[in-house]
Amino acid sequence: MMLARRASHALRSASIAAQACRRPTTTRHLSAAPSTFIYDVTSGDFAPKVLQAQVPVILDCHADWCGPCKTLGPLLQKHVTALNGAVALAMLDVDAEQDLSAQLNVKSLPTVFGVWQGGVQDHFVGAKSDAEVEAFVAKMAALAGGAAPAEPAGDSIRRRAFAALIEDGDVAGAAHAFKSEYERLRALDDDNVAEGAKRKKSFTPVEFDAERPAAAEMAWCLLGLARCAVANDPPEPDAAAHLLGTLRDPKRAGVLDGDAELKAAVSHLALALDGAAADAASPLAAAREAFAAGDAEGGLDLALAAVRDSDDADAKEDARALVLTFIDALGAVPAATKARRKLAMYLF
């Protein structure tokens, strides 16, 4: 138990380090993985692939020069494959990811962690027999009930669907992937709510529960569907706007606040849809145009001026909303911080 606690602490430290040096995960790398539930992992995708995975993850820390690693790896792959997605296998090359390996406190090879819901549940060091590996894999799968999801994990679905949309133009395929994953997560949550009703307990729906990784995945699915609506031929802006309204429901504020990338993506789509529907003669049109052209500070200044100078309450509110959307789209940058201070000064 003490070893597990130490490993969990190391995992949390590694997560912080990985997020600090995160680099974009390419769709090419994802498509090159042996299967949906067996994949390489790096500091750039450690959090979504290991800490936020929808199934338990076996993290195999190995190196090409390690003889026991070459024996253990195929055994892990065999037993993970046999469970058909009830558990995932993430393979970490310690030579290629030395900083992350150090954060995980990997001293000997092979080292294997069993991770579920962001924490280390079990681990072992050194080679194991086939029966021991099978038992370890089964133990990890049992943590989530042992049932394989009907679709690949949410993060994989999101990235593959965006790749299909952006690179291949397969809008229908992307929409199907997003819809299927959203419905799968929703169905699992319905089971939880039903069980809670039996026990006379209330549950926050998963899509509004910022503490559950699935909430962000469901929001990404809705965002993906909205993007598909925009990309359809012909475009469906009303459907996209409806989905965007669902995403910006106040009950989901905590989910968006917990994922800066998601929040910025939602705000960018909102700006695109609002700009397309806006009156070109509107005082805020110039602000939108400047922001869309890459002049973020100019767009913010124009929108802030509208907040400051508007006598009409509705016009002031429209300007305020636009400033906040600009801020969310920018993320944590000095211009956004400065604009937030000015907005507060003009309003209060």
Image (cartoon, rainbow, N blue to C red):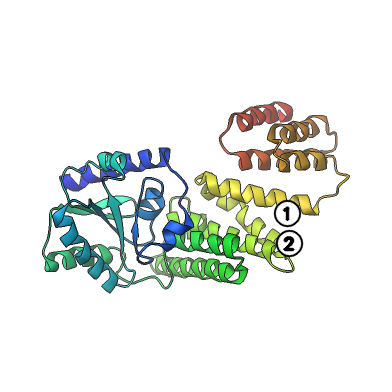
Residue 55 lies left or right of residue 273; in this view the side is left
Q: 177 or 195, which is in the foreground?
A: 177
How many numbered marks have been drawn onto this rendered protein structure? 2
- Quarter-of-image position of residue 226: bottom right
Identify the mark at residue 237; answer none if there is no mark.
2
Q: Residue at x 58, y 61 (%)?
A: 167
112 relative to 55, above or below: above
Q: Secondary structure at mark 2?
A: helix
Q: Quadrant of the C terminus?
A: top right
Q: Which residue is mark 1?
A: 273
Question: Picture coordinates of residue 25 (x, y %)?
Answer: 45, 51
Would residue 260 appear left or right of 2 to someone viewing this image? right
Residue 122, picture quadrant:
bottom left
Q: Disc 2 marks which amino acid?
A: Pro
Q: Secondary structure at mark 1?
A: helix
> Residue 136: image x %, image y %?
19, 63
Whether residue 202 is visible here, answered yes or no, is: no
How far from the left and from the top, in percent, is residue 179? 55, 69
* One can see residue 97 in this view: yes
Q: Residues within 10 Å of mark 1 (few under 14, many from 20)?
A: some
Q: Which mark is residue 122?
A: none
Q: Are marks 1 and 2 in contact (CB under 8 Å)?
A: yes
Q: Residues within 10 Å of mark 2 (few under 14, many from 20)?
A: some
From the viewer's perspective, is 106 left or right of 321?
left
Three-letter residue code for mark 1: Leu
Which residue is pictured at 64% across the width and 38% down the height?
327
